[in-house]
Amino acid sequence: MLMGFKRLFALLTISACAPAAFAQEASQEAAEEVQRWGVNMTQGVTEVSRTTYDLHMLIFWICVAIGVVVFGVMFYSMWRHRKSKGYKAAQFHESLGVELAWTIVPTLILIGMAIPATKTLYDIYDTKEADLDIMITGYQWKWKYDYLGSDVSFFSNLSTPQSQIQNQQPKTVNYLLEVDEPLVVPVNKKIRFLITANDVIHAWWVPDLAVKKDAIPGFVNESWTRIDEPGIYRGQCAELCGKDHGFMPIVVKAVPEDEYHSWLSDRAAAAARIKELTNKTFTFDELYARGEKIYNSACVACHQANGQGIPGTFPAIAGSKVATGPMDGHMSMVVNGSPTNPAMQAFGAQLSEVDLAAVITYQRSAFGNNMGDTVQPIDILNFKNK
Amino acid sequence: MAHGPKPGFTRWLYTTNHKDIGSMYLWFSFAMFLLGGCMALVIRAELFQPGLQIVQPDFFNQMTTMHGLIMVFGAVMPAFVGLANWMVPMMIGAPDMALPRMNNWSFWILPFAFAMLASTLFMEGGAPNFGWTFYAPLSTEYAPPSVTFFIFAIHIMGASSIMGAINIVATILNMRAPGMTLMKMPLFVWTWLITAYLLIAVMPVLAGVVTMMLMDIHFGTSFFSAAGGGDPVLFQHVFWFFGHPEVYIMILPAFGIVSAIIPTFARKPLFGYSSMVYATASIAFLSFIVWAHHMFTVGMPIAGELFFMYATMLIAVPTGVKVFNWVTTMFRGSMTFETPMLFSIAFVILFTLGGFSGLMLAIAPADFQYHDTYFVVAHFHYVLVPGAIFSITAGVYYWLPKWTGNMYNETMGKVHFWMAFVGLNVTFFPMHFVGLAGMPRRIPDYALQFADFNQIASVGAFLFGAAQIVFLFNVIRTVKGGKKATDEVWENPEGLEWSVPSPAPYHTFSTPPVVR
């Protein structure tokens, strides 16, 4: 909190100065290509999203009509029935007929709304006969996609750099809505999503698909979509899931079917290549350089760019007992997670052996830890198999 | 007039007088309103433009959580209890509340509860950061250590509310003046009677859910942990079984206040008194069977979705009846527009807008797009700010001359109203737009397409905040002096409270009045 006040103070003192004004201007410039002043729900690119939009507009116009009548009467009487205009108050205060009318008429309107809503709901719930199954798992604070029936599985992280978030660089068009690896899917195929979470509750939401489903640890929820046109569709996590809830976007890239298949086989081949690397021996410098990259996508959210963590919430890596202690303890912490603090996830299944070896090597020598030792991918594999 | 108030501070500490306790509740809730409001301003300042400028995400989450908790449990609920303390005995011709010592106790534990809740801001790991709805497992396995203090604070607030509710039920059912039959009671008394039953029914459920959390965190149970055989969704069912009636707890007394004010300034009796009573009771009943409309996206079976969708849509019927009745009360009246009336009219209009977005949210397939976006934030602020806050403000202006014996400054009251009205709409109306355009709630930073409306909303929030300073100033001035109020204060207002002198003596109705 103290930090908050310091930053507020700093902001107030510099707000009139050039750098802040420059940053502001720069972000305004980038916003030129952004669709500004959006006021309504997207019609989306699926049948369900269009039906949902129609339903939304139907209810909206019904509400507008009711509003015009009710507020019309109200404003009329506020205009005409004023004491200042000498209007004498009537004294009626009951009418069974009127009371019955305004109970029954709204009920009928509601029934009129409920019928199309029920139909749409049945449609949304029909997850049968899908062409493709994708498992979506929410993690703090990234998404994992598993293409069921193939070896392809990867994490999708926010790719907006911290420098943009901290206002050191101008913000680009897809600020906070861009990821390192999008979910690639074919168009015109019924895709079933199986949605779950690894830690806390998240929600997977892409407005253009009209799919929003909670990702709940221990449960597997189902949803489906069939995308009409190729394109890139962006969404965000929609359930408060901790510190970086606002920083775990979703990007769906819909491509023609043949393109999808060639992408899938490329991904499978790449996964096989990474597996082969497990048997290679790397130098310290190779591991350190690779580890720095991995650290900045997998660890930095909690342990911070300087390795100091956030006091009281996330422990520091700089000078920590784990990172400067025996290798086994360090491997166990990263591979299996912390036995006492659930916020420290088990990265064993999230990262490849190469990446695990690299990030551990990096942590032991970065932030002034100076251990200078290395761990090889094969050591990680042996540790896992122990 | 056997006894006056004790001199000095002990008057407030030991008092069992319903007027003293009512005043303390109201001042306490106003202090909490300002505190929660400052937190809202931190949120709006951070959201003024994209990027992180003022606070970091974890502290942002602490602000949204504390803002919600303090406004719901610290500002709105105690304010209504304060108004009930002052007005219920005077409206039914009773000398005091039925259980005056418990009344003192139920107030005095509140400052401790909120001191404890606020102190978590200074603890290691920070204050609760999991939202005012504190969904497990974010609030259990993943919570900061201060969660235990939060749980204890909730227990104390719950105990206070239950005692307050029991007191109000006991007073209304046992202490009405001769001739004051149930169907002659002012609507404020009726709505509070029903609210009190809701409180007694659901506050223990809240206590239950936080106790289950406590067990999960410290005693090795796993009610809400899937890994231990528990169920995170169970948390949401239990929480919203409390949470939905809770939102009606925050609006039913408002209906009562507005139903008192509109007839006075329209100089015409309330239209459809008995249908108002039945509508209130129906809303209270329905509030128990709609909770899962907050959970349309958790993956309920379709039968559950449909049931909760239909039940929720039904609420529009009795709520509509109320709005139609208020409008018809105004129709062919002889209206003047003093500050309480302005706030009440704004209540009817803006609460209806909040009702419309509520109806839209009830439609489950459309809710899949609205859920957890700023559309929801706009919706519940439209029902809570013009609903609860405006009605409380209207009530304070309406009864302040009776309480203090002085008239408030009408010009300043109007300035307050217009600042609050404009500020509120500038703040919350654009939230409908960004929500529909796809901005999730509870995020400290957002994509560039939401920047413009967020900037507008932030400006409105500071205007709304400034309006409350005018209010505070006006109230203090009225307490200290001003034009003397007559006993009736307004033109032929209805109700026993206007039959006692202004200011209302320390003890009223020591001998019960007779109601014809």
Image (tube, rainbow, N blue to C red):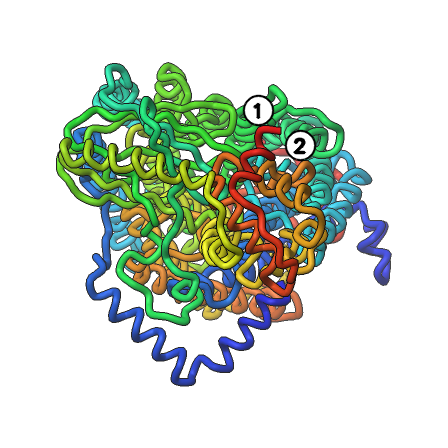
Picture quarter with the N terminus of chain A: bottom right
Give B51 or A150, whichever is nearer the viewer. Answer: A150
Whether B125 is drawn above or below A382: the answer is below
Q: Residue at x 42, y 38 (%)?
A: B270
Callout 1 environment at 10 Å: few (<14), some (14 to 19), or many (20+)?
Answer: some
What type is the residue that disc 2 sits on?
Met
Residue B372 appears in the picture as rendered: no
Disc 2 target residue: B213
Picture quarter with the C terminus of chain A: top right
Q: Nearer the viewer, mark 1 or mark 2?
A: 1
What type is the residue that disc 1 sits on?
Ala
Q: Which mark is residue B226?
A: 1
Task: Name the N-terminal-most of marks 1 and 2.
Answer: 2
Q: Tag 1, which chain?
A: B
Co-location on one chain, circles 1 and 2:
yes
Q: In the drawing, does residue B400 fall left or right of residue B430? A: right
The part of the image, by quadrant, that contains residue B138 is top right
Q: Position of residue A162 (x, y in %)?
A: 43, 62
Callout 2 environment at 10 Å: few (<14), some (14 to 19), or many (20+)?
Answer: many
